[in-house]
Image (cartoon, rainbow, N blue to C red):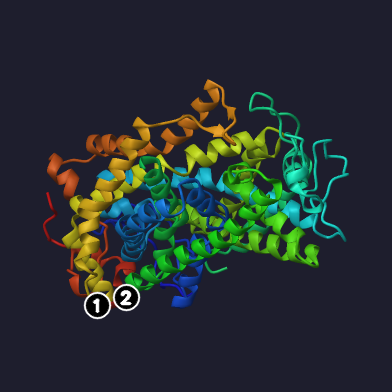
Amino acid sequence: MTAEKSGPVINGKPEDGRDPEGSSSSLDNAEYNERGQWNNKIEFFLSVAGEIIGLGNVWRFPYLCYKNGGGAFFVPYVIFFVCCGIPVFFLETALGQFTSEGGITCWRKVCPLFEGIGYATQVIEAHLNVYYVVILAWAIFYLFNCFTTELPWAGCGHYWNTENCVDFYGENGTNITNPNATSPVIEFWERRVLKISDGIEHMGGMRWELAMCLALAWFICYFCIWKGPKSTGKVWVDAGTQIFFSYAICLGCLTALGSYNSYNNNCYRDCIMLCCLNSGTSFVAGFAIFSVLGFMAYEQNVPIEAVAESGPGLAFIAYPKAVTMMPLSPLWACLFFMMLIFLGLDSQFVCVESLVTAVVDMYPETFRRGYRRELLILGMSIVSFFIGLIMCTEGGMYVFQLFDSYAASGMCLLFVAIFESICIGWVYGSDRFYLNIEDMIGYKPVFFIKWCWMILTPGICAAIFLFFLIKYKPLKYNNVYTYPDWGYGIGWFMAMSSMVCIPLGMIWMIWKTPGTFSEKLTTPSKDLKMRGKLAALSPYAANDAKLKVDGKISTISEKETHF
């Protein structure tokens, strides 16, 4: 990465220690580490692709597509892709590129009243960092078990198998009369990998093998990023949340990655290409999973619902089953789980990096010195690892499902997307933001994007959010196990921990910020830098070297917002 040879703005003041009036500051003269930019477009493109093309494409999309009727799911998925996915994806990327700030300070700059959006995205990100890496631990565990002449889930007869274990591949499934018959693949997953207990009330002992795999996953993650970025109604709910989950929307990741772009990068074209690439990958994964599930259902002479387990378990049942029927199955199993690990790792890299970028940009005077940034990453990794150990117990899968269903998907992402669209579409002003984008890329995107920010995206997301609440059904693990009330309480607490940031942030800024309500609502931060043709000289900007990119200095535009 290259870097701007200039220091950060600290609390609206330039690095040289002068405030807008030129008075001295208590800041010392210690040298700050450079924030940096991507060396080229390829770095940005591959980083975003690595983030959005991940485990969700492999296990989440195929299951949701099947569960909601295949073709019936495709229609709302495409509508969400066009009306919500692409517009919000582009909004977050362009906002990061325009402000050159992380997931919290970018919202503070364009509209201080909506700074809570940034905090909400980072709370969701923190939840995701805890449980997403657990999937990598499972994949690493499977990978270590692939180095045998015969895959351990290929047949029965192991110490973890029960008397109900039946190798359907070796027998005629139509002649099996045991109604409780299970496949060796499922028993390996549930009894060897998870050693799953009978409920969240019984967490059981620690699965130390999984704990070591989790530690290895975090070890790899840390040393890869420690030097920075370089190194029916229900059908609509599922379609909408899958778009947001798969595209890493409302997590602050896209804003963080976009903030390292050069000011004139064509982020509009990049976003369209990346969105199409991501959805195409999901459909390819869907073709693979449907064929395996259909074969397993035929083989066991059961409905496909009986073999289509929800969540990440699908990747650890259907795909391992498929490789057992291939020649040189251990080799193919190794390749598959290595692919799964790489898919998850690059997504995890960006998740951690985005959270770190948000914190560093909030407190540059603290974390852009020496090795403090690296220590921050280490601290986050250690804390997330110890919290993740809960999901390495015998009852950990039940906790994992709470994280997956409440903390980092579904209603949280919809709620944040509503306010992101309102903030840019109406408060900051879509016309103003279009001028900013035109200044960056040289032309205005199609009018449809602006229309989505103002009407379609917040309207569709709000309608689905309300439908989700009205038709809410408590989570059931594998559609069988019902959680106790306190388990649902934990889930709702995790969900509310992010959503409450937005209203609380508004209340705090209204109380803290001087001026009329209209001024508090529509006035960007004074240290919002604008570059390029819209630049306008101001006394405080003249002292800030960071604003002199492109050789021009600017402050906020005087364009009216929609208010």
Give whichever of 402, 536 is nearer the camera: 402
For the residues labelled 2 and 1, say whether their Cβ atoms are less than 8 Å apart: yes
- Residue 379, given in percent of the width and then of the height, sits at 60, 47
In the picture, measured across the screen, residue 86 lies left or right of residue 374, that is: left
Query: Which is more toward the observer, 254 or 394?
Result: 394
Where residue 471 sits in the image (x, y, percent)?
37, 32
Secondary structure at badge 2 equals loop
Residue 246 shows up from this direction? yes
Residue at 59% from the left image edge and 57% from the top image edge: 289
One can see residue 111 in this view:
no
Instruction: Using a 10 Å C-alpha cutoff, classify the residue at mark 2 as few (fewer than 14 neighbours), some (14 to 19) or many (20 or more).
Output: some
Q: Residue shown at 41%/31% (left/top)?
A: 472
The residue that disc 2 covers is 264
Residue 206, quarter of picture = top right
Q: Quadrant of residue 262?
A: bottom left
Residue at 54%, 22% (x, y): give it.
486
Q: Position of residue 134 (x, y in %)?
A: 64, 47
Position of 65 compared to 185: left or right? Answer: left
Q: Nearer the viewer, mark 2 or mark 1?
A: 1
The three-letter amino acid code for the residue at tag 1 is Gly
Mark 2 vs mark 1, CA separation in Å: 8 Å
Closer to the chain start, of discs 2 and 1, is 2
Residue 513 image position (x, y, % from top left):
22, 41
Q: Is residue 222 above or below residue 476?
A: below
In the visual, does 143 lie left or right of 485? right
Q: Which image quadrant is residue 96 in?
A: bottom left
180 or 263, which is in the foreground? 180
Identity, as a three-letter code, of the amino acid under mark 2: Asn
Residue in the picture at 44% in, 47% down: 122
Q: Which residue is mark 1?
A: 442
Q: How many marks?
A: 2
